[in-house]
Image: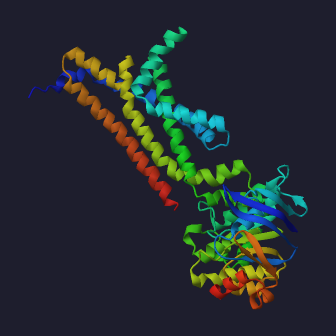
Amino acid sequence: MIKVEQLHKSFGDNEVLSDLNTSIERGEVVTIIGPSGSGKSTFLRCLNLLEKPTSGHVFVNDADITNPKVDILKVREQIGMVFQHFHLFPHMTVLDNLTYAPMTVKGMKKDEAVRKAKDLLERVGLSDKTNAYPNSLSGGQKQRVAIARALAMEPELMLFDEPTSALDPEMVKEVLDVIKDLAHSGMTLAVVTHEMGFAKEVADRVVFMDQGKIVEETQPKTFFDQPQTERAQNFLDKVL
Amino acid sequence: MNLDFSQIVPYIPFMLEGVWVTLQFVIISIIFGFILGSLVALVKISNIKWLKFLADAYTSVFRGTPLILQLLLIYYAIPQLTGYDISPFLSAILTFGLNSSAYVSEIIRAGIQAVDKGQREAAEALGIPYRPMMLKIILPQAMKNILPALMNEFITLTKESAIVSVISYLDLMRRAQVVASDIYRNFEPLLFVGVLYYIMVMILTIAGKYVEKRMRASD
């Protein structure tokens, strides 16, 4: 469903991604891990063009989204994204956060959007917060709303950019549980994370990045038990 | 003490009329300045380089020269250059509107750019197009930064409006001077219109505080 070919990204003289090649199949759960500054988030953000690649290609369902002729807004409709800092719309209620994009972008009728939003809020366990404003929610609740907001667009693929890094430790689980639930439902996921337990348990594949390159790409069991490279070994020694 | 307020009593209706004259051109200038300033702000946050340069130059010139100079230039230069005999009223609106738009454009630009970058990214990631993103996501949040600063600009404009007295526009300030030369007393009419200015500014200040409180209520 996603194919990345010879992806490069530089900020000025600083090359943050160099020659990435990989793909994500439908229904697959891929976690991207690696030290800070390894380019994980930049890589993820290239997949929906929040970051513009310097060169290379990103194919989403066989359409090359780096081609300026491709309508990126249409592509983004199919790709949900969840950010480290939630980025809920603070001037809208939780319900409006969930219904605004489907109504504006997909032209969904209001009662249908509301019904869907309520279903999603129930799914993430926040039915009682329907009419609350984001600022009255805890971090974990905000992130669950953010996940529901992305799901309201019925995406084929969900990108998670360190979804639990800004959370208090006791709220990490409630968010991971929602993501796990998504993984088990067959949704395609790409998750940048520092939660090794999550990567080990849920991922179909682990992509290990360091200094802008994909160093290892393998099944979680192999990666965590027998890392093939010294860099991965060093990294695991530090985080596990 | 040589104070005699009874001397200005016959002139009070004449001076009070100045309040309306002042308000008239201040209100029109504010509206003109706000519309033009919004357009200039839109240009400033756009990606069109040469238009951006023009907008920045425009702001820089109007903020970098004295208001009274701008007023005199427009009042005297337009008849001299074009032969069109511009009225004091039109000169006043033009000067204050153009000048205010420079400040307003900066207020709006700064207000929009102060909105968290993540808001824009979140909207983009959802596939929301530029227009609804600006109108429904970014601007409502920017308003919180913009409105209080905008009220300040309106207050400044109201006070500075007294400058139009130099082109003989019969505003509140000018009327005080007319009265003063009529009765050979400066202090009483000046004090009287001073109080009137203060009341106008206080009304705007209270309105501004009210707006600010309403904005904060939604936090």
Which quadrant would the C terminus of chain A be assigned to in this image?
A: bottom right
Query: A202 left or right of B122?
Result: right
Q: Nearer the viewer, residue A17 or A30?
A: A17
Farthest residue toward the left?
A: B1
Is residue B82 in view from this perspective? yes
Task: Decide: is A104 above or below B185.
Answer: below
Farthest residue toward the front?
A: A230
Q: Position of residue B210 (x, y in %)?
A: 43, 51
Instruction: Give the quarter of the image for residue A149.
Output: bottom right
Query: A159 left or right of B85?
Result: right
Q: Position of residue A68 (x, y in %)?
A: 82, 50
Is residue B31 in view from this perspective? no
**Which residue is depicted at the point 23% across and 19% down?**
B180
Q: Position of residue A80 (x, y in %)?
A: 76, 66
**Which residue is depicted at the point 46% across and 50% down?**
B211
Instruction: Give the quarter of the image for residue B186.
Output: top left
Query: B10 left or right of A113?
Result: left
Farthest residue toward the top?
A: B83
**Which residue is depicted at the point 37% across and 33% down?**
B159
Q: Nearer the viewer, residue A227 or A182?
A: A227
**Which residue is depicted at the point 77% across and 84% down?**
A202
Which quadrant would the N terminus of chain A be assigned to in this image?
A: bottom right
